[in-house]
Image (cartoon, grey):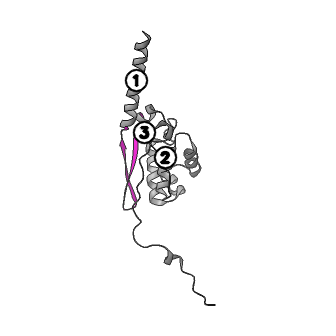
Amino acid sequence: MKHYPHPSPSASRPTGPRPPRRIPAFHPVPVGNRADGWTPARQAAFIGMLAQTRSVLAAAQSVRMGRESAYRLRRRGGAAGFIAAWDAALGKSHAPVNLASAKSTGLSARYRAEAGLAQVVMSAGRYMATRWKPDHNALLQLLAQLDRAVLATERER
């Protein structure tokens, strides 16, 4: 029987820059207003640092939060988009989230319109910034709800 040498750990690692990651836009998880808590900006920075470091502990520490609180945030209601962004940052496959649907996101149209969408910007594997975009679908849904409410009150007269 022929014995082959075990490959060294460095031989199994690919060399060169990491492949670019596309982090999907997401709505921040609804949380209470606390300066030392998971603000929407802190959530987006966490996802960016998670994509850069690929370590939940390092990403949480970079935004001055704890690893355990990051996992608690992930388990909260309305975190579907955040979970998809988390998984994409780690290179895991994830089910796409329909950001225009309250059923998919677990978030009301009002919250989605007020919070907007966070888009993490990466360059050469490094977290650069977060772009905040308005959620036009949520605004249109709110207008449709308002129209239905006006029609309902006019019918009652």
Q: Nearer the viewer, mark 1 or mark 2?
A: 1
The answer to whether residue 80 is left or right of residue 140 is right
Q: Quadrant of the C terminus?
A: top left
Viewer-side residue, 120 vs 26: 26
**Total tally of numbered discs in the picture:** 3
Q: Looking at the picture, which amino acid does disc 1 mark?
A: Leu
Residue 133 within the magenta-colored segment of the rendering? yes
Residue 100's disc number: 3
Does residue 63 appear in the picture of this structure? no
**Above or below 17: residue 49:** above
> SS class of the residue under badge 3?
loop
Q: Looking at the picture, which amino acid does disc 3 mark?
A: Ala
Does residue 79 appear in the picture of this structure? yes
Dividing the picture into quarters, in which one does residue 126 lie?
Answer: bottom left
Instruction: Report the magenta stretch's main SS.
Output: strand
Residue 146's disc number: 1
Q: Earlier in the sequence, mark 3 or mark 1?
A: 3
